[in-house]
């Protein structure tokens, strides 16, 4: 997860999340755990997705933040822009992206001991 937000207590992070809440959401069906281990590739082509346990309706940025983190973690941040280009995402709402990064970090904190 994004270490920028984990220096905060859960309460501080939650307050920052509320301060940055988007006014408009683009609700679509999301995977909910869109990361490289859940993407199946066969013969160099996308063949499917696994682990739909968190699937449901959400803003598309929820999944975009998760996969951007996964790509950066596994291959390096320089590869994230290529994913966004291939995805067709040209005008990234960086404020919304930041909001979902914080939200993702908040959820990840619940998995820590």
Image (tube, rainbow, N blue to C red):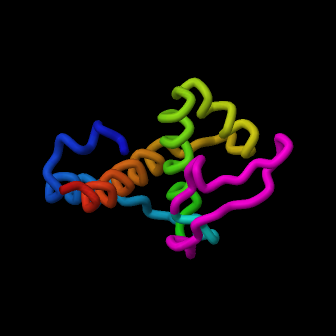
Residue at 86 percent of width and 43 percent of height: 43
Q: Could you say where residue 75 lies in the image, as x and y percent from the top left?
A: 56, 29
Q: Residue at x 75, y 40 (%)?
A: 86
Q: Nearer the viewer, residue 27 or 68?
A: 68
Q: What's the residue at 33%, 51% (across, down)?
A: 105
* Side of 45 where 90 appears, left or right: left
Q: Is 103 displayed left or right of 89 in the figure?
A: left
In front of the other: 18 or 50: 50
Q: Quadrant of residue 79?
A: top right
- Identify the image quadrant of the N terminus: top left
Above or below residue 106? Residue 83 is above
Please give the range of residues in magenta: 33-57
Q: Is residue 86 left or right of residue 105?
A: right
What is the number of callouts on the image?
A: 0
Determine if the magenta segment contains residue 44: yes
Q: Percent from the top left, x then y, of residue 19?
A: 27, 56
**Residue at (60%, 56%) from the top-left corner?**
38
Q: Quadrant of residue 61?
A: bottom right
Instruction: List x then y, in percent, for residue 58.
Output: 53, 69
Asked if residue 111 is among those painted magenta in the image, a careful observer would answer no
Q: Where the C terminus falls, by quadrant?
A: bottom left
76 w.r.t. 90: above or below: above
């Amino acid at each position: 997860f994004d270490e920028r937000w984990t220096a905060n207590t859960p309460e501080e992070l939650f307050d920052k999340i509320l301060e940055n809440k988007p006014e408009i959401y683009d609700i679509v069906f999301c995977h909910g755990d869109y990361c490289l281990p859940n993407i199946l590739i066969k013969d160099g082509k996308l063949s499917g997705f696994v682990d739909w346990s968190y699937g449901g309706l959400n803003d598309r940025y929820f999944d975009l933040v998760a996969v951007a983190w996964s790509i950066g973690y596994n291959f390096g941040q320089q590869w994230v822009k290529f994913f966004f280009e291939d995805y067709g995402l040209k005008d990234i709402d960086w404020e919304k992206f930041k909001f979902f990064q914080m939200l993702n970090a908040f959820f990840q904190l619940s998995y820590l001991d």
